[in-house]
Image (spheres, grey):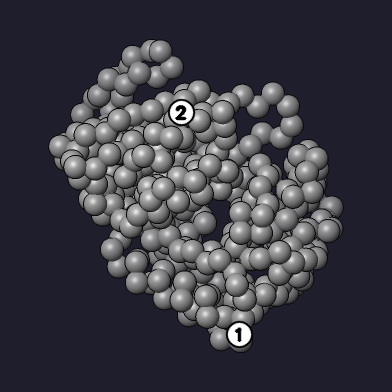
């Protein structure tokens, strides 16, 4: 264990840095094919996890790969709901000069708090041919435990192909979930944990497949049972919540417990109908992800990407969906346990276990 000196909000302190943390970052950048002849930019904001910024910088330096660090001010939230775990960072709002630098880069290492996955500027960066490697805002212990596995690439690619070939996805559960998703022309992406192709984005941890349905493609009922997960709140459901989905939009949230009340109040707080819309649907594929991790780490130490990738979970998400022409800061990621998922009647997840 090596104590390194980190600048934390203007204070310089000694922080223990474990060698295997830096090794995991170096492995990631190796898989991303980061080389000294590329233009590499580390994008951070003032509230980024400084330990991860340090690890990214030191890992690249150890690889003799130069990188420029750009830090933008975190944008204040003065009113409305607190935004967490959305993947829709507003860090680049009003940062046109920074955006131009990212478009000119070969590889952007994204260390923003929320991540650039659903940010309005991401499409322009990818169209320029830039690779975006989003490092989820997790404690490095989580990242090192879920370091990219080269074997995951083929697993995710197989799931992508199945989704792209399907006409219909159905999701059912013993609790009463019965959802149908029209998959024709749906944009499907998979994340195995790194990016090595121009114009692509990946996030770490990886190991999941998600489809962004076209408008008016999702209909049915979702029944969240105790033990399912709300990652925005970083809590397990303790009571049943029943959501009716009509042409992509949640039209009713039924339940008498705290979970239903929290969901209603949070979505209402955005005063934006798009907060109720479907963002993406998919399932987790990473066998290394642990269901109980929310109980192990403090809330400030995790972003919850591990639970999104948990093998066999059905991931339903509300909010931004660029493929349906929708952007909003309102977002829920809701991993559901014990579901069965079928594509054109062929099971891909049965009772919460990948087929």
- How many other residues sit within 10 Å of disc 1, few (<14), some (14-19) or many (≥20)? some
As drawn, 301 above or below 15? below
- The image quarter in which residue 277 lies: bottom right
**Quadrant where the N terminus lies?**
top left
As drawn, 57 above or below 321? above
Determine the CA span between mark 2 and mark 1: 47 Å
Tell me residue 39's x, y (percent).
Answer: 27, 39
Image disc number at residue 344: 1
Which residue position is annotated with label 2? 97
Frontmost residue, 128 versus 35: 128
Q: Residue reaching furthest bottom?
A: 345
Identify the residue at horizontal 52%, vertical 67% (top origin): 188
Q: Is residue 317 visible?
A: no
Tell me residue 214's x, y (percent).
Answer: 66, 65
**Lateral position of residue 91 relative to residue 235, left or right:** left
Mark 1 element type: loop
As drawn, 260 above or below 160? above
Earlier residue among tags 2 and 1: 2
- How many other residues sit within 10 Å of disc 2, few (<14), some (14-19) or many (≥20)? few
As drawn, 245 above or below 10? below
Q: How many marks?
A: 2
- The image quarter in which residue 341 lies: bottom right
Q: Is residue 201 visible?
A: yes
- The image quarter in which residue 100 lies: top left
Mark 2 and 1 residues: CB-CB less than 8 Å, in contact? no
Mark 2 element type: helix
Identify the residue at horizontal 34%, vertical 40% (top origin): 105
Tell me residue 192's x, y (percent).
Answer: 38, 61
């Amino acid at each position: 264990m090596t104590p390194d000196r980190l600048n934390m909000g203007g204070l310089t302190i000694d922080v223990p840095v474990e060698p295997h943390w830096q090794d995991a970052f170096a492995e990631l950048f190796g898989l991303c094919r980061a080389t000294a002849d590329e233009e590499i930019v580390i994008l951070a904001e003032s509230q980024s996890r400084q330990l991860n910024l340090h690890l990214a910088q030191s890992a690249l330096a150890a690889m003799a790969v130069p990188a420029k660090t750009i830090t933008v001010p975190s944008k204040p939230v003065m009113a409305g709901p607190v935004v967490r775990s959305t993947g829709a960072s507003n860090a680049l709002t009003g940062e046109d000069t920074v955006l131009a630098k990212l478009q000119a880069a070969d590889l952007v290492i994204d260390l923003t708090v929320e991540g650039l996955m659903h940010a309005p500027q991401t499409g322009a960066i990818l169209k320029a041919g830039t690779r975006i490697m989003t490092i989820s805002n997790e404690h490095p212990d989580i990242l090192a435990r879920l370091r990219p596995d080269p074997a995951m690439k083929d697993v995710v690619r197989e799931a992508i192909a199945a989704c792209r070939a399907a006409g219909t996805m159905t999701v059912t559960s013993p609790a009463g979930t019965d959802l149908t998703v029209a998959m024709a022309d749906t944009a499907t992406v998979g994340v195995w944990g790194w990016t090595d192709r121009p114009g692509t984005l990946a996030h770490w941890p990886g190991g999941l497949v998600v489809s962004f349905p076209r408008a008016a493609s999702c209909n049915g009922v979702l029944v969240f049972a105790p033990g399912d997960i709300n990652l925005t709140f970083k809590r397990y459901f303790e009571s049943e919540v029943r959501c009716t989905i009509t042409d992509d939009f949640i039209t009713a949230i039924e339940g008498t417990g705290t979970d239903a009340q929290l969901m209603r109040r949070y979505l209402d707080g955005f005063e934006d109908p798009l907060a109720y819309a479907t963002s993406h649907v998919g399932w987790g594929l990473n066998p290394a992800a642990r269901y109980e991790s929310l109980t192990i780490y403090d809330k400030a130490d995790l972003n919850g990407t591990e639970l999104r990738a948990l093998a066999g979970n059905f991931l339903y998400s509300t909010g931004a969906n660029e493929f349906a022409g929708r952007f909003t800061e309102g977002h829920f990621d809701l991993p559901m346990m014990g579901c069965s998922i079928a594509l054109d009647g062929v099971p891909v997840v049965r009772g919460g276990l990948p087929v």
